[in-house]
Amino acid sequence: MLLEINPLVLPDIGLVFWNTVAFLVLLIVLGKFAWKPILKAINDRESGIEEALLKADKMKSEITAMQNENEALLAKAREERATLIKEAKEASEKMVAEAKDKAKSEYDRILADAQVAINQQKNAALAEVKNQVGSLVVEVAEKVLRKELSNKADQESYIKQLADGVKLN
Amino acid sequence: MRFIPIFAANFERIMSFLRIKTLLVASFSLLAVLCSTSSFANNLAVDSAAIADTNKANVETVTVEEPKVEKKKEEGSFNVTETILEHIKDDHSWHLWGHTSIHLPVILKTSKGFEVFSSEKLVDEHHEPVVYKGNFDYKLIDGKTKIVDANGNLDKEASKQLWDISITKNVASLFVSVFILLVVLLSSAAAYKKTGVKTAPKGLQSFMEPIILFVRDEVAVPNIGAKKAGKYMPFLLTIFFLILTNNFLGLIPFFPGGANVSGNIAFTMTLAVCVFIVVNLSANKSYWEHIFWMPGMHWSMKLFLAPIELIGVFTKPISLMIRLFANITAGHILVLSLICLIFIFKTVFASAIAVPFAVFIGMIELLVAFLQAFIFTMLAAMYIGMATEEHHHEEAAHH
């Protein structure tokens, strides 16, 4: 009864029929020629974007790995350089020390040699001096002897005097 | 583009608000519609008629002898209910401007076959219904084409054989919306083919794509699940865009719009039936099991629940039908009532209040036009999701 009261809630068979036709036409035509290509395009684009993002991420990680590698290489190189420098320093120090040692020993040897030579010369010189003194003494003694043999007393005091003088040497 | 994240953020809030709101609107408008012609509206009509009568009485003191007995249309009298219902209802002619209107074809299927003629022949120059003699004698009775006998009285028996599939205003408006949808969507589909998928969408394409994405990401996928959503996307998108276009066309007060298609129960019924068919055809075994023999319950409870669940199968599409119909019709009635205030008060100053309010309601109607299309699609997706959902819990219980 209520449905008969108001035409608003009474569906028209005509509109139901045409609406069904319109809806089916829309569903089929749009489904085939609009929704399918549009959704496919959107999906393609989304998967493309996803792929590109993944690729970018991969590239990024690759770049990071490369950077890490570079850094490691650099660090290694730096370490190597440091050890090299250290070794070189050590070597040079060692060389210097060795050279110093050698120089010192040479110096010592030269000094020792020199001393030895000086001593020898000194001894030689002393020996010569002694020799000369000896011969001088002999000469003096000869002269004295020739002169003083005449005077016995004088002679003896003189010898004594001479002999005292010689002793100082 | 921007509204989608906003929408997604406020989604839960809007939904809960909407459920209450739509329920209220639906129940009130249904009540109002059912009762309007019988009691309340008649009073209004009589009141305004009475005002008109007194006005007239002042001018032509004695000439009008029996104004209340003769309830024919008088110049100056104004029936709000009739005016509003006339705008809400379907019609055989589509008003363009002034006295110009398109007379749409009448298509009738009777026991003597199909018959097509212009609706112009069913009315005279004063828009009063006249008898048209075709295979039968046809006359408009309360806006509907009926078969009448020789005296012009309704022939009930013969009218039962009559199928009226005329191109009415609503049908024509529906065709306009179908045309718009085809043009817009096919051209944006062509744009994808032309520019390829790697370039950003342009123009119309960029306007449609967010809406399509919105239906996919906010309506289909959350309710049906990403795996099965693709299968139902064409159906949901078609429903959404058809309702949206008709809602917007209905808000246009003049020619390309002006019809109240999505506020017509036949339109919403057809779509609801389509949803009903799709839901029940795609329903899986566990869905029917949950309806007829609820798992995990005592047998007496199962017997008790089965009829309730069975009713639920039908109330879901019926609620879809009534919700859209009532929301859109209520909006139209509201705007028309506000405009009618001017004629009720018979002063142009009433428009100072009526017009801003009508504009305000119109703004709300723009929102409602989108929301109702969204809700219809959303609930359709939800019902499909419920019907195709895989239930694992009872299987897990068996093992």
Image (tube, rainbow, N blue to C red):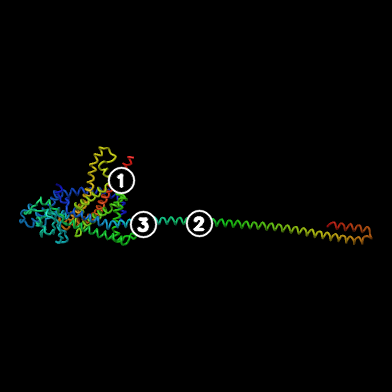
- Could you say which disc has been placed on residue A45 in the image? none
Chain ID of residue with mark 3: A
**Residue denoted by label 3:** A49
Please report contact status of discs 1 and 3: CB closer than 8 Å, yes or no.
no
Give residue A143's position: percent from left, percent from top: 90, 62
Give residue B222's position: percent from left, percent from top: 31, 50
Quadrant for the C terminus of chain A, please. Answer: bottom right
Residue closest to the far front: B112
Residue B69 showing in the rendered view:
yes
As rendered, which of B137 and B242 lies closer to the eye? B137
At label 3, the amino acid type is Ile
Pair 2/1: label in front = 1
Cα distance between the residues tagged 1 and 3:
31 Å
- Could you say which disc has been placed on residue B390 in the image? 1
Horizontal arrangement in the rendering, residue B285 relative to residue A165 (left or right): left
Name which quarter of the figure residue B3 lies in: bottom left
At label 1, the amino acid type is Glu
Residue at (85% x, 59% y) in the render: A134
Q: Residues within 10 Å of mark 1 (few under 14, many from 20)?
A: few
Q: Secondary structure at mark 2?
A: helix
At label 2, the amino acid type is Leu
Which mark is first along the chain, 3 or 2? 3
Chain ID of residue with mark 1: B
Cα distance between the residues tagged 2 and 1:
57 Å
Pair 1/3: label in front = 1
**Residue denoted by label 2:** A73
